[in-house]
Structure formats: C-alpha cells, structure tokens
Image (cartoon, rainbow, N blue to C red):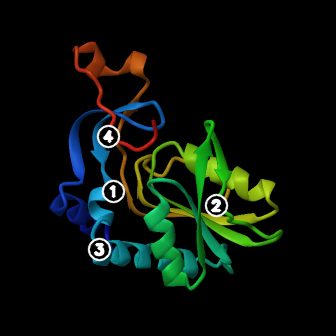
Amino acid sequence: MTTEEVLTIFEENQALLKGHFLLSSGLHSSRYLQCALVLQHPRVAEKLCVELAAKAKADANIGQIDLVIAPALGGVFVAHEVARALGVRALFTERQEKVMTLRRGFSIQPGERCLVVEDVVTTGGSTREVMEVVAALGGVTVGAGSLIDRSGGAVDLGVPRHALAVLEVPTYKPEECPMCKEGSKAIKPGSRQ
C-alpha cells in the first residue's frame, strides 16, 4: 500500500483536515489526520492494520512478536487489528493522573516481545510513554508502528519503526505559530485532554 493509497482512504473518509489545530503533543499544525473517522469502518481498519502488521512481521530486526500494545484512545483499534493480523494479544495503556499506565487487569510477562503501535506519530511522545510502561513491567519493545508518521520519518525511538504513510507536516510551538500570529485560534480535535 502506497502513501497515496493511504491518504486517499483518509480523504474519502473526510479524515484529512485542514485548518489550525492543537495537536496532543502541544504543537500547532495546519493539517490534522482524524484516524477515528477512518477506523470507524471495520473493513477499512482491518485493511490498514493488516498492512501495518505485515510490515512489522517482515522486518527481520523485529523478530517474534508476543503482543501488540498501544496508548488509548487513538491506538486501541490499531492495536486490536494489528494483533488480530499477527495472531497475538492486544493491550492498551491509559493515562491515570497524567501518567501512562497498564490497567484493567492487563499484564506483561518478563521478556515478552512487544510491538507498540499508534494511529499517528508526530513527536513519538505517546509511543515512548508506552515503551516505558513495557520496560517497567519487564517486557521488551521490539518495534513500533503507526498508520501515519507526521514527522517525515524524523522520530527515532531506538527500535525499528514502520508507518503506512510518512508525511512531513510542519508543526509549530504555540509562540512560533504563524497562524496564531495572524490571529487564528487553534482547535483541539484529538483525544488527549
């Protein structure tokens, strides 16, 4: 699946938005990918996540994957569908008092090999938080993946990483944002409050 094919799916589902957005990273951007509008369609979600799972499975540097884990909320469907394609468990982390944690009776056994996935990566912050949870519980992050990489491939997580589409979308610190300087107010369409 090419970047163009992935973006066409997003456009067909009105999920590639243009405007002035406040990203979950705290940065501002003129483009936003609302993955929930794509993932609400099970067959589309399955198609995208099967492709992401195939990329991870084909990477010899990743090797065996015992489970797939993602940050809630955006990564939950991605983890589920990628795990289903790989035939392994799917877990998700949540923020509890602003700290990423594993709850709901989920557990990671020491040495379990984990693939961390997300819907969109901008700075890699949420992925890193999940990787820290995995490490604290004795698991090993063997790779990471996302449907969309907004960083242009710049994010380095220290593990093999795959995305279905890699975009270079400019982001700005609020104090440097040209849209803010023009008087526009950023809206927050994402899930992290």
Q: Residue at x 31, y 74 (%)?
A: 42
**Which of disc 1 and disc 4 is earlier in sequence?**
1
Mark 4 to mark 3: distance in Å? 21 Å
Q: In this view, does 29 lie to the left or right of 89?
A: left
Mark 4 vs mark 2, foreground winner is 2
**Which of disc 1 and disc 3 is earlier in sequence?**
1
Q: Residue 50 carries which label?
A: none
Q: Residue at x 56, y 80 (%)?
A: 57
Secondary structure found at label 2: loop
Q: What residue type is labelled 1?
A: Cys
Mark 3 to mark 1: distance in Å? 11 Å
Name the residue tied to disc 1: 35
Name the residue tied to disc 3: 44
Secondary structure found at label 4: loop
Q: Which residue is drawn at 51% across and 47% down?
A: 154
The quadrant in which residue 1 appears is bottom left
Name the residue tied to disc 2: 104
Task: Answer whether residue 156 is visible to the viewer in this image.
Answer: no
Mark 2 to mark 3: distance in Å? 28 Å
Mark 4 to mark 1: distance in Å? 11 Å
Name the residue tied to disc 4: 189
Pointer 4 with pointer 1, Cβ within 8 A: no
